[in-house]
Image (spheres, rainbow, N blue to C red):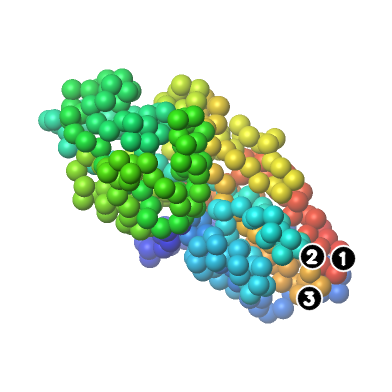
Amino acid sequence: MHSNRLTIVSILAIAAILLAACAPSTGTPAGTSAPASVQINGAGSTFAQPVYDAWIYAYQSVDPSVTLNYQGTGSGAGITAILDNTIDFAGSDALLTAAQYTQGKDLQMYPIMAGAIVPIYNITFNGTPPANKPLILNGKTLAGIYNATITMWNDPAILALNPDLASFLPAAKITAVHRSDGSGTTQLFTLALSAFSSSWTAGSGTSIQWPVDTAGNGIGGKGNPGVAAAVQNTPNSIGYVEFSYAISNKIAFASMINQAGILVVASADTLASAMNDFATNFNDKLTNTIVDAPGQTSWPIAGYTYIILHTSSSTDCTKELKLLQFINWALTSPTAAQIATNLGFATLPGSVQPTVLTALGQVTCNGQPVLK
């Protein structure tokens, strides 16, 4: 997914809360001692990169002995790098395949936080609509738009959801914008469309054949910037981007009626609700799907982003300890949680956190648990 690099202003804003940072849990494996500096390298998900960048910046004041680097190369590249043992951890929104688990031998995915996808739009209204009245959609209608079965902004299904905008919505054709590049954003968005409607038959994946393209009212854009630019430059269009990207670029996005029939807005709270709804649904690989959650306060287009680690090592136990301490801080520190919230993400709620922390406690070096 797109790399939303922090601006200097963002970094300075985050620095203001660093005094609240809490030190990570400790526990040095037998026979090791902390050196003056430990270099830890990660790569992968660009969806999660804004948070990783901010966490790394904040963590300098928590443990100055650690130098953390993260490159937003994309989930696929991150997986390749962890398989090739050229990085210490990978960030990924895509799940490992059975072949990758076999090749990696001891790889494990750990959910680290959840993010949202939001529909953005550019509608040429008939007149001036009421202020502070965003477009409202539900899953079935959104799937219909991308299925090319709902093609006009004054379609009865859209009017019914938007009584305050009904007289302002134009009799204009909808242009549906999608990613032209393969992305985890598209994978999550199409996974949600599959859950929303049995009529959605295009499937889910990082890249698909879009029904709107076949119908002649779909266009592609590369990355979040490409989708956002296409929407902003195309009257009466709709697209989808990461919530964090919409926030940082002040792009209007739709609210949604969720599975429970309740109007919700993307936020850290509605992401946490979606995680809580499926807290007991983790499989043996510690992965989970949280789209179309049933809770009354749950955002329906939500998904986890993961850190991938090797679970056993016999080389540098101090580096393993420092890496797990950083991850433990990211999962448990109020400072880390606030940073994620500010950037449009949500760290793990109490119903999910123990499952992940227990799994991290099973990582070993020289046959001994790394975290005590």
Numbered mark located on residue 116 in the image = none
Mark 1 vs 2: CB contact within 8 A: yes
Q: How crowded is mark 3: few (under 14 residues within 10 Å), some or many (20 or more)?
A: few
Return the x and y of residue 12 as percentages of the image width and height: 41, 62
Going by the image, does 364 lie left or right of 114? right
The structure residue drawn at horizontal position 66% and vertical position 76%, both measured from the top left corner, is 38
9 in relation to 191, above or below: below
Residue to which mark 3 is pinned: 315
The tally of labels here is 3
Give the amino acid type for the residue marked by disc 1 in the picture: Gly
How far is the residue under mark 1 from the one under mark 2?
Answer: 7 Å
Q: Quadrant of residue 321?
A: bottom right
Residue 51 at least partly seen: no
Q: How crowded is mark 1: few (under 14 residues within 10 Å), some or many (20 or more)?
A: few
The structure residue drawn at horizontal position 55% and vertical position 27%, both measured from the top left corner, is 295
Residue to which mark 2 is pinned: 312
Residue to which mark 1 is pinned: 367
Give the amino acid type for the residue marked by disc 3 in the picture: Thr
